[in-house]
């Protein structure tokens, strides 16, 4: 591949001039961006880091002045609001600049954990039974809901708003947790049937032709067998908590071949139905031979030592090859989408 000018777009929690990036570049919070930047540079590309907080005009100006061949999109918010993640990709589409990952339709779909389940259930994908509790409306009746259940924010990501209190045994606990989510996070909640099983993550790469990577599983080695096991915010991001409870990701083993094949086909179907492009991750619960869809992440972390990249490596694709493939998939998707203009006179 020829050398490209790549704008590396990532989130900031405040407006920060590019001259100050160096003060933060080697901190743990910036590791994913650092991994991608260093790898793009190794691949021979000219990388322009651009952190975004709430100055959309600066971003538009930079795109127009720099004229990048590609935006490597690692942004998940605007002005600290995740609701705006799809809007940034819509803006890039309007600016006519290629970008990595999924477009606004997929990002918006995958944000709504209830809507995705409705769509996938229609297409015979097994999902937990659920109810949505909107913050501005009375909670639907739970009299016939099967407990235990799981209550979490409808549209937040990265396990935000999920703790041990998310697992509820009855209607009273469910209503209390819904109220907590409404009050603490100001968002709608989803009440799901709790699937007591294995927590599994499946990485996928591709646009039309898809590669499914070996599944990763979240293990809970020190949590008593009788306790429910699921990914909380702490179990993902608090290293001391992970160490205390023996929480770690590893390779999923001892799965029957037929179940593994069914899981892979199911994940590819989900990926396509939710219009995910380039790369993504499907989160599942596996109970015996039953595989349940939990949620889809069209913009997973691609840090070198995290699950997605490790799964790619297990399949034989090293990190440089992975980043290079994400770049080429993005460019081919852009070319395909812009190859045939709409003939409005013929419609």
Image (tube, rainbow, N blue to C red):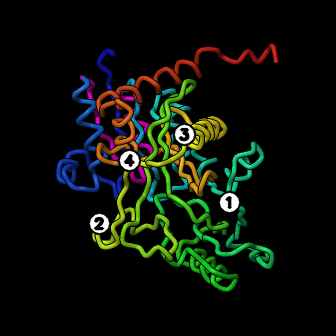
Residue 252 in sight from this viewpoint: yes
> Dot 4 lies on which element?
helix
Q: Kindly check if marks 2 and 1 are in contact, taking CB atoms under 8 A apart as contact.
A: no
Indicate which label's residue lies in the foreground, 3 or 4: 3
Residue 106 in sight from this viewpoint: no
The answer to whether 23 is drawn above or below residue 223 in the figure is above
Upstream in sequence: badge 4 or badge 2: 2
Residue where numbered disc 3 is placed = 257
Q: Is 48 contained in the magenta span? A: yes
> Dot 2 lies on which element?
helix
Q: Kindly check if marks 3 and 1 are in contact, taking CB atoms under 8 A apart as contact.
A: no
Stretch in magenta: 44-67
Q: How far is mark 2 from mark 1, CA to CA?
A: 30 Å
- The percent coordinates of residue 248 (x first, y second) are 35, 59
338 sits left or right of 163 in the view:
right
Indicate which label's residue lies in the foreground, 2 or 1: 1
Residue where numbered disc 1 is placed = 128
């Amino acid at each position: 591949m020829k050398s490209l000018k790549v704008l590396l777009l990532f989130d900031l929690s405040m407006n920060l001039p590019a001259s100050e990036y160096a003060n933060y570049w080697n901190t743990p919070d910036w590791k994913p961006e650092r991994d991608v930047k260093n790898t793009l540079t190794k691949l021979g590309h000219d990388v322009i880091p651009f952190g975004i907080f709430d100055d959309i005009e600066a971003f538009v100006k930079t795109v127009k002045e720099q004229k990048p061949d590609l935006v490597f999109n690692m942004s998940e918010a605007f002005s600290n609001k995740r609701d705006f993640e799809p809007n940034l990709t819509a803006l890039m589409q309007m600016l006519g600049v290629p970008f990595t990952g999924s477009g606004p339709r997929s990002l918006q779909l995958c944000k709504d954990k209830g809507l995705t389940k409705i769509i996938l259930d229609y297409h015979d994908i097994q999902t937990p039974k659920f109810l949505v509790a909107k913050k501005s409306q009375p909670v639907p009746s739970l009299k016939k809901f099967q407990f235990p259940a799981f209550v979490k924010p409808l549209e937040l990501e990265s396990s935000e708003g999920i703790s041990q209190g998310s697992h509820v045994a009855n209607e009273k606990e469910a209503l209390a947790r819904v109220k907590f989510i409404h009050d603490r996070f100001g968002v709608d909640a989803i009440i799901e049937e709790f699937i007591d099983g294995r927590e599994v993550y499946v990485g996928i790469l591709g646009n039309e032709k898809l590669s499914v990577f070996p599944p990763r599983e979240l293990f809970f080695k020190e949590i008593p067998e009788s306790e429910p096991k699921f990914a909380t915010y702490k179990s993902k991001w608090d290293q001391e908590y992970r160490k205390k409870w023996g929480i770690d990701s590893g390779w999923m083993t001892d799965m029957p071949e037929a179940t593994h094949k069914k899981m892979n086909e199911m994940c590819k179907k989900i990926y396509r139905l939710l219009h995910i492009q380039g790369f993504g991750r499907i989160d599942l619960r596996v109970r015996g031979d039953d595989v349940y869809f939990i949620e889809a992440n069209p913009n997973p972390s691609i840090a070198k030592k995290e699950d997605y990249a490790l799964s790619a490596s297990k399949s034989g694709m090293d990190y440089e090859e992975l980043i290079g493939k994400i770049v080429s998939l993005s460019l081919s998707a852009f070319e395909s989408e812009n190859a045939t203009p709409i003939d409005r006179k013929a419609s």
